Amino acid sequence: MLELFGTKGCPYTKDLRESLLWDGEEFAEYDVEEDREALRRLIALTGGTTVPVLAEDERVIQIGYLGRGCIVARPSSAEDASK
């Protein structure tokens, strides 16, 4: 299944979500600003914090939407240690 990593505030996440819905694609969506585990998975998959990211079977298909994306702040190491 497709997985969409993004944020509520990123307009490119919204655009990619709308494109997937328009195409009738099934996908799970993760807000990496609200879900720290999803943020860790995003960083593990891409090495960065640009959203949106579309992945399937732990393989990145697309980073950004039409060449554009939003940057999410990395968690501090103190935050990581407390999780």
Image (tube, rainbow, N blue to C red):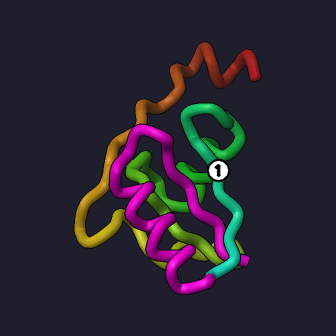
The quadrant in which residue 69 appears is bottom left
Q: Residue at x 47, y 32 (%)?
A: 74
Residue 12 covered by magenta stretch: yes
Which quarter of the rendered picture does the N terminus lie within?
bottom right
The quadrant in which residue 81 appears is top right
Q: Is residue 16 above or below residue 59?
A: above
Residue 67: % across, % down: 23, 68
Q: Relative to 75, is 28 on the left or the right?
A: right
Q: Residue at x 56, y 55 (%)?
A: 5
Instruction: Report the residue that reaches farthest toward the bottom.
Output: 23
Q: Relative to 68, is 12 on the left or the right?
A: right
Q: Residue at x 57, y 52 (%)?
A: 42
Which of the two residues, 40 or 28, is positioned nearer the viewer here?
A: 28
Looking at the image, how many numbered discs can be counted on the residues? Answer: 1
Q: Relative to 28, is 7 on the left or the right?
A: left
Q: Residue at x 55, y 34 (%)?
A: 33
Residue 23: % across, % down: 53, 85
Which quarter of the rendered picture does the C terminus lie within?
top right
Classify mark 1: helix, strand or loop.
Answer: strand
Residue 10: % across, % down: 38, 45
Instruction: Report the residue that reaches farthest toward the front.
Output: 22
Q: Which residues are magenta?
A: 1-24
Three-letter code for the amino acid on which mark 1 is drawn: Tyr
| Few, some or many residues within 10 Å of mark 1 (<14, 14–19, 20+) | many
Residue 25: % across, % down: 62, 82
Q: Give the residue number, with chain letter if any, for mark 1.
A: 30
Residue 13 covered by magenta stretch: yes
